[in-house]
Amino acid sequence: MKRRNNEKFLKTVVPLLLGLVFLLIIFGCYRLITKKNKTFLQTIDKSLYASISHDAIYGIHLNFKGSMPVLENISDFSLVLANGKDEIVLPFESNVEDDTLTFTTSNYINKGINLEFLPTGVYYLVIKAVTMEDDKPITKYFSVKNDTDYQNLEYYTLTKDGKNNKIDIEWDTYEECPTLRFTIKECELPNDVYDITIDPGHGGFDAGAVGTLDGVTYHEADLNLNVSLKLKEILEAKGYKVAMTRTKDEDVSIYEPGGSATLANDVKSKFNFALHHNSFAYEASYLKGLEVYVASDIEFDFANLLIDNITKQANTQISPKEIYQTAPGIYQRYFSEEEILEDEVQPSNKTTSMIYYYNIRELGGISTQSTNDGRYYDINGYVANPYNKSNNTTEPYLLELGYVNNEDDLRNIVGHEEDYARGIYNALEEYLSTNY
Ligand SMILES: [Zn+2]
């Protein structure tokens, strides 16, 4: 009898107990995991929030501007991505005035938080502050709330060793506390996403500038395409996915899908290179060499690398042109008062702080003050730039590689297009390999 009871016990109760223990372990693990995830959000001080008034991705950089009321005993502010385990300290410039802390990650649109270098994981954007309580320093975390006109952001890192990360930057709430969550994970690059866009200037009915060498006529559109195809080849050999506005002699639209002012943003590429060759009017025949046209409010690190690498690799020089020049070889052309007055579309939304060239101004969305909101349709048939108000855009460069009506320049260019392309590539690699 006793033995039978034991057998019964072993056959029924023990498995039940084991099952129960197993369930308890599973439940415990679940609690541990969920508690671990919640711990950081639970530690956030909900007495006040920082207000984010601006957020924008431009090229490979993300920037925030914001403010927060400051309590008397709070000091030592920093901006961090945190999850209770790891903390990533972000660039942070701040100022306290009238009990308000104002901050920015950078005053340059192409500096700030470099999205290429964020490690995988889940993080929350918070202000980390040190408060003194009973003469003891206590660390507090304050969350951020969305006071921008924008919602979530999405970013794919450049292809590196065949791999990409996807970054989702999402506004959320946790127990009525607003949060901004960064989810960074490895992913396959979607078919319609590219790393870099090249826009070979002109084409089709528009041949661009014209030059002659040893009795042969050269058209800018062809030279632009030659350098662009070489650059595409070099970039693809290094594993980058490259989009082009044209790959042969054909017309290219501007604001329609795939156009020279839209393609780079259509395919979410990080950089857009508009490649051109210049020409001078007779009275400026001293002009020759390289000119790099850039957006306003940028730092010149990449532009300087383009200048250094192209002049070295292609054995050319920077242009002596002084008009629109901001730094040696670097040019920022803004609308002039006259050009705004001549604008046939009234009321014009152009200002003298906007860049004149559409393939810089329009590609940068809000970061570069895109002007084409559709009002130019009646005058010249331009449909609205779909990225007119976008806060997630490419970083564009317009390169005038040389003057086709300067004989030295043209001789240096024809047959040596690969040197110019390699110069651009070398600049890009040097820029990306540096942790800014
Ligand atoms: Zn051109």
Image (spheres, grey):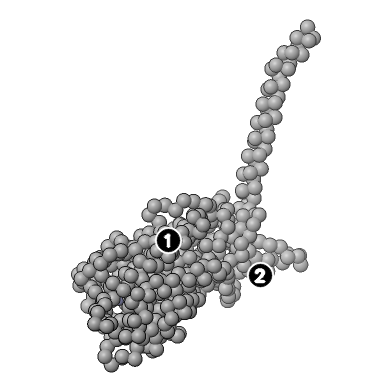
Which quadrant is home to the N terminus?
top right
Q: Quadrant of residue 379?
A: bottom left
The location of residue 78, given as percent across then percent down, is 62, 67
Q: Quadrant of residue 331?
A: bottom left
What residue is shown at x 65% (from left), y 54% (from top)? Answer: 84
User: Which residue position is annotated with label 2?
Assistant: 76
Q: Residue extending furthest top?
A: 1
The location of residue 405, given as percent across then percent down, is 29, 84
Callout 2, which amino acid?
Asp
**SS category of the residue bearing label 2:** strand
Q: Quadrant of residue 29?
A: top right
What residue is shown at x 38% (from left), y 54% (from top)? Answer: 192
The location of residue 212, given as percent across then percent down, is 26, 82
Question: Upstream in the sequence, badge 1 or badge 2?
Answer: 2
Callout 1, which amino acid?
Glu
Residue situated in front as seen by the camera: 369 or 329: 329
* Mark 2 surroundings within 10 Å by alpha-carbon count, few (fewer than 14), some (14 through 19), many (20 or more): few
Residue situated in front as seen by the camera: 270 or 403: 403
Question: Which quadrant of the frame does ligand 1 lie within?
Answer: bottom left
Residue situated in front as seen by the camera: 54 or 423: 423
User: Which residue position is annotated with label 1?
Assistant: 236
Which quadrant is home to the C terminus?
bottom right
Callout 1: CB less than 8 Å from ligand 1: no
